[in-house]
Amino acid sequence: MNLTRALLAPACAVLAAGALTVPAHADTAVACSVPDLVQAINDANTGGGDTLILSPGCTYNLVDPDPNDPENGLPVISSPITLVGNGATIVRDSGAGEDFRILKVDANGDLGLENLTIRGGRPNFAEGGAGVLVELGGDLSAETTIFDDNDVVNSSSEDGGGISNYGTATVTTSLFTGNTARHGGAIDSDGALTVTTSRLTGNHGVTEAGGINNDSSTGAIDINNSRISNNTSNSDGGALDFDSGTITIGGSTITNNTVNRPSSGFAGGIYNNGNLTVTGSSISGNTINSPSGGFPDGGGIENNDTLTIRNSRVSDNTINAQGATSSLGGGIANFGAPLTIDGTALSGNKINDTGSQAGGLYNSGGTVTLIASRISNNVSDAPPGGVFTTTAFSAVGSAITNNIPTNCTGSPVIPTGCVG
């Protein structure tokens, strides 16, 4: 089934069945007209909120920004408003003479999006959020929503292409594709973010995180049963970049993401400088391309803070860096941080660079706990191919085997239990 149709089908079925429940006082049908949509949002704001039922399949084509706040295509959401899309699209017209995002939620706003496409937002000012900007104190709930081809074009802005969140955002059964921003091509969140059963694919972070970016110590991100794939970044975190905050990833797939940087690209999959826990997930097939020297590391993950990986797989990640000064950690590169690997396979990772080390795990100064795990079939040019560590740890109930050219020989410290 087509991905877009698959994402939209549940909501369409609910609508077709007449199962949508809205309060009797909050049910306004909106004709297929931008002026009618603008008027309905203004009325809802002044009236204390509303549920707006958009015209089925309509394209609300925004040619001009909102006159009261020209950074946005539609009036600022300042009350509880739900837009039930019925498969409608809200899009900034490609020929619009001015740059603007689609929607903004202020500190008093609570915006719900259902069965709707948000497309073509293009802010060109300090605040990003080309699709939706959620201010501190604001709330966003996006269900069965597509964020498509939204682009933050101001190079000084650091906020997400699809969503920039400083408040609370909940994303369910939604798709982010073709979005671009300096940080967080799909989503930049310095607030509370939950992403469930969603797909983030083909987004681009000009500097960091093709998928999701967080820079705030108070940021809390929870990613569940989602797929983050084929995103790109020009520096750090092909998929995810967490510079701070508390993050959990469960039952998810982070795959085929890429960092393209001439030198010193970091973390083809996940860059972590926060408190990150990964459970029951796969980080696989991610790549760093750094062809002009430097110090690329962490084909799958680069970790600089607290990282726990349980019952997961870190596999088939690659660093392509011929001519680099050094290339480290095809699977995981850990720098001075506590790292727990529990019930996890670290396998098939590779560094293509003369002088590279640790196709599997590179650890410099960190505290490593390895439990019931397997580090195998990883490849680097120089030994060790499996594990390089400057601090001692034990392979408790674990196996470090079949790595090329060695398992641990060549490491400054040999983990207890590692042979060859």
Image (tube, rainbow, N blue to C red):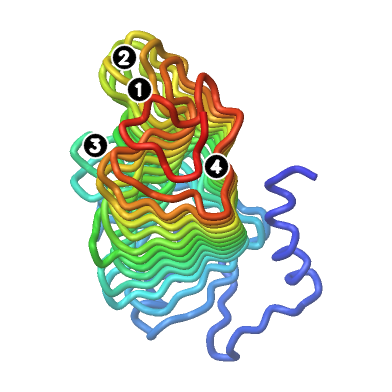
Q: Which residue is mark 1?
A: 327
Q: Tell me which numbered mark, 1 or 4, is placed earlier along the sequence.
A: 4
Q: Tell me which numbered mark, 3 or 1, is placed earlier along the sequence.
A: 3
Residue at mark 2 to residue at mark 4: CA–CA distance: 23 Å
Label 3 sits on a secondary structure element that is loop
Tell me residue 370's x, y (percent). Answer: 47, 52
Q: Of 418 and 382, which appears nearest the observer?
A: 418
Quadrant (top left, top right, bottom left, bottom right) of the N terminus: top right
For residue 314, the mark is 4
Residue at mark 2 to residue at mark 3: CA–CA distance: 32 Å
Tell me residue 141's x, y (percent). Answer: 48, 69
Residue 345 can be seen, yes or no: yes
Residue type pointed to by label 1? Ser
Q: Tell me which numbered mark, 2 or 4, is placed earlier along the sequence.
A: 4
Tell me residue 114's x, y (percent). Answer: 58, 65
Residue type pointed to by label 2? Ala
For residue 251, the mark is none
Q: Which residue is mark 3?
A: 154
Point 54% across, 58% down: residue: 310
Label 1 sits on a secondary structure element that is loop
Q: Of 280 and 235, which appears nearest the observer?
A: 280
Characterize the local packing of mark 1: few (<14), some (14-19) or many (20 or more) Cα atoms within 10 angstroms: many
Point 34% across, 46% down: residue: 392
Q: Relative to residue 256, is residue 193 depicted above or below?
A: below
Residue at mark 3 to residue at mark 4: CA–CA distance: 35 Å
Q: Tell me which numbered mark, 3 or 4, is placed earlier along the sequence.
A: 3
For residue 324, the mark is 2
Residue most extreme to the bottom? 24
Q: Nearer the viewer, mark 3 or mark 4?
A: 4
- The reply to whether discs 2 and 1 touch (Cβ–Cβ < 8 Å) is yes
